[in-house]
Amino acid sequence: MTVMVRKARRLAACFLSLLVIASGAAAQSWSPTGSSSSLRFGSTTTLLSTGQVLVVGGIPNGFGPVKVSELYDLATGKWTASGAIARNRFNHTATLLPSGQTLIAGGLVQRNPSNQDASPTASVEIYDPATGAWSATGSMNDTRWQHTATLLPSGQLLVVGGFTFSIGDVGSDTSASAELYDPASRRWTRTGSLTTARGDHTATLLPSGKVLVAGGQDGDTPLASAEIYDPATGLWTPTGTMVSAHDQRRQCNHPRIDLAQHSRYQAPDGAGPGLERRVVGARE
């Protein structure tokens, strides 16, 4: 079983765990739910203010990221198609804005339909749940994927780090840059750079309003370092180092890309929209 197959199945199991909710906390039981129309990994899920779950992008059976987004209804357990994004992307971020709209940023987009090559993008799109449509907004200053996006108390969106190399090319370039998106002006401005370039990391909004970034990878090197962003100054400060280096390879957010094997993706075995149910409880 290939690395990407294992990651795809792990992601599908993680994704289902977000959607299948036990009828009672005490029961802690599982029940089947509706299957999406497309198998996806490298996609994003966002809980909307309507109570629906918005799924965007990702890679289906074979290669060629999915453009059509889908909505999952917790009450009916059913999926419905929603608007198509302009750029078919995966390994992007999705953030629910205070307006109730969802902003997706960056990720990888397919360069050539005849092969598996993909390039990072700086493009950004916004989903309006009232219309089910996507619209373009200001692009980021830098292309990036496997980055993080954190909504600040000010209403601005902080995007940090990520990888900048293309799938199919030799390299493992990592970004230290950070940017702020202002929903009012729909523009991005640069803010302080990380002290250590990183992708595949985590970002957490602290009660103080500051943001803690931890772990990830710098090129092929897993990181144990952490740093804190202060919105008041726009600067990063190193903080305590973790005991062990970590990246998101065991998290549900994204399938981790092994940088030593990033030249090609493998399609999941038995790929299809029913994969969620087949992999629950699977062990590697």
Image (cartoon, grey):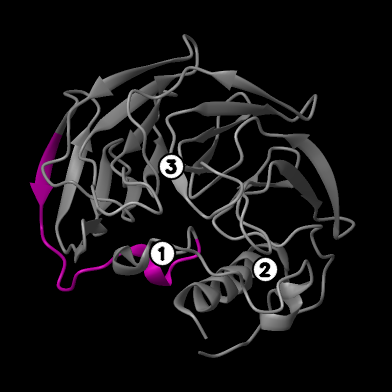
Disc 2/disc 3 C-alpha distance (Å): 28 Å
Q: Nearer the viewer, mark 1 or mark 3?
A: 3
Looking at the rendered structure, the number of numbered marks drawn on it comes to 3
Say what secondary structure mark 2 lies in. Answer: helix
Q: Nearer the viewer, residue 108 or 228?
A: 108
Report the magenta residues as a range: 236-252
Left/right placement of residue 152 relative to residue 222 reads: right
Considering only vertical position in the picture, is 93 above or below 266?
above
Rendered image quadrant of residue 49: top right
The residue lying at 16 percent from left, 23 percent from top is 233
The residue lying at 73 percent from left, 82 percent from top is 278
- Residue 119, numbered circle: 3
Disc 3 marks which amino acid? Ser
Q: Nearer the viewer, mark 2 or mark 3?
A: 3
Packing grade of label 2 (10 A; few <14, some 14-19, many >=20) is some
Disc 1 marks which amino acid? Arg
Packing grade of label 1 (10 A; few <14, some 14-19, many >=20) is many
- Residue 16, numbered circle: 2
The residue lying at 67 percent from left, 81 percent from top is 279
